[in-house]
DNA sequence: TGGTATATTCAACGTATGTTGAATAGTTCT
DNA sequence: AGAACTATTCAACATACGTTGAATATACCA
């Protein structure tokens, strides 16, 4: 029952934190349908709130998106720092760090991917960051030939896996434990990091 | 100069094939901005044509999308058939078939991914097909433990690579030759197909 | 030559969307 | 108690979109 609220400030006690409700609904819907595919009105509806309350709190739709994507830590930086420790066992460290960072924030990852891919803005912040931070630091730590292509492939392995786990949510990947994934996938990633000689 | 056309059927000779122009513009824009991010008016503008001509030829916007995605062959079927030949050297066969099928149709692949991911329809035809055909036939041909998860991982390797090559277009992957990719990536994929014992 | 079909534009419609401004009710500060 | 602030809804807006129907000019067929 969407409790019919009256105009004006509600008495303290109903304080059911509409702001948080809006953020929650937004996160879910952005993750499920992307930025463009989600309307403010449908977010408002799910949050049980008038549309204009969103504007009041977050300015406009992009403001809401930004608020939605606030993360406790910046996963890309953690990953970049893990790369710096050299190529030995890098695949496992990469996987554990990546999954450790994103598993608690699947919806945000999904939003980012859907938003980034859904609106072909190749200047999108996530793409820039991924390119500059992830690939650049990978290139720096790899040995041998074709470092750029191999760095891109390693990124594609991480992103592809995350795509299936967080966005498409294939059950067998979405429900696997971190240890399982490391066990099954780390050797294959490591083979791109340090090709057998 | 967008030649100002007059109302009524143009004299034969200007026969610059507006239908094909519409399809071209649509393919490019769907590939670049996804289905939702592309408006019929902007397609019409790029094709140098009135909006309603699109409806005339393709019925409605989804009709245009469908027309845009017509492929000479069905790549998923080719891949599924290649899987059937058993796990030995499967990675290389998969990569060559996949790239052979999609390299000539990057824009279509990009459209599909952007459209599929941009509008979180988890019933989207491409997803269903990928799940049922690709993963199912992979599961059938793998040996050992964790077949489902490994099949999902192999798919994620293919999709992730294609994402970077066709959609994001990282230069080092987008410009690499098929042989390069096979050389750099096939061993890593094969290690998921047949884990070292 | 006449009639029908086709290619094309024009004009308008209905709808959904993001946004804005005002109204109202409660809280907090002085 | 009064003023200032905050939370909330309501009503309206301009805009962009997909779609439709009519108008017009040419091509094709008998």
Image (spheres, coloured by chain):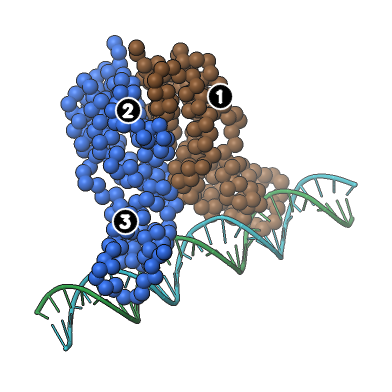
Chain colours: A blue, B brown, C green, D cyan
C28 left or right of A154?
left
Q: Chain of mark 3?
A: A
Q: Quadrant of residue B184?
A: top left
Q: List x then y, in percent, for residue A45.
A: 41, 62
Q: Quadrant of residue A175?
A: top left
- Vertical relation: A130 (above or below) A197: below
Along the line of sight, which residue is nearer the eye, B169 or B18? B169
The residue at 50%/21% (across/down) is B140
Which element is circle 1 on?
Answer: helix
Nearer to us of marks 1 and 2 is 2
The verdict on a common chain for dots 1 and 2 is no
Separation (CA) of disc 2 from disc 3: 31 Å
Which element is circle 2 on?
Answer: helix
Q: Chain of mark 1?
A: B
Nearer to us of marks 2 and 3 is 2
Provide the residue designation for mark 3: A23
The residue at 39%/40% (across/down) is A167
Separation (CA) of disc 3 from disc 1: 44 Å
Provide the residue designation for mark 1: B78
Task: Say if mark 3 contacts mark 1, CB within 8 Å.
Answer: no
- Vertical relation: C12 (above or below) A186: below
How packed is label 2: few (under 14 Cα within 10 Å), some, or many (20 or more)?
A: some
The verdict on a common chain for dots 3 and 1 is no
Q: Quadrant of residue B68?
A: top right
The mark that comes first in sequence, 2 or 3, is: 3
D11 left or right of C9?
left
The residue at 28%/35% (across/down) is A99
Q: List x then y, in percent, for residue C6.
A: 73, 48
The residue at 33%/42% (across/down) is A106
The verdict on a common chain for dots 2 and 3 is yes
Label of residue B191 in the image: none
Provide the residue designation for mark 2: A181
């Amino acid at each position: 029952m969407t409790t019919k609220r009256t105009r004006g400030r509600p008495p303290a006690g109903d304080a059911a934190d509409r702001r948080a409700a809006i953020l929650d609904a937004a996160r879910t819907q952005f993750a499920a349908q992307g930025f463009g595919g989600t309307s403010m009105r449908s977010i408002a509806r799910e949050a049980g709130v008038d549309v204009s309350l969103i504007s009041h709190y977050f300015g406009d739709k992009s403001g809401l998106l930004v608020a939605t994507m606030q993360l406790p830590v910046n996963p890309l930086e953690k990953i970049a720092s893990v790369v710096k420790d050299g190529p030995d066992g890098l695949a496992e460290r990469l996987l554990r760090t990546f999954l450790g960072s994103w598993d608690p924030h699947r919806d945000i990852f999904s939003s980012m991917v859907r938003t980034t891919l859904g609106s072909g803005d190749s200047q999108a912040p996530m793409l820039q960051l991924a390119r500059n931070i992830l690939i650049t630091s990978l290139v720096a730590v790899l040995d041998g030939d074709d470092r750029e292509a191999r760095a891109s492939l390693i990124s594609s392995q991480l992103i592809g896996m995350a795509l299936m786990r967080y966005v498409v949510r294939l059950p067998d990947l979405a429900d696997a434990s971190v240890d399982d994934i490391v066990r099954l996938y780390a050797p294959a990633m490591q083979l791109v990091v340090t090709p057998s000689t």
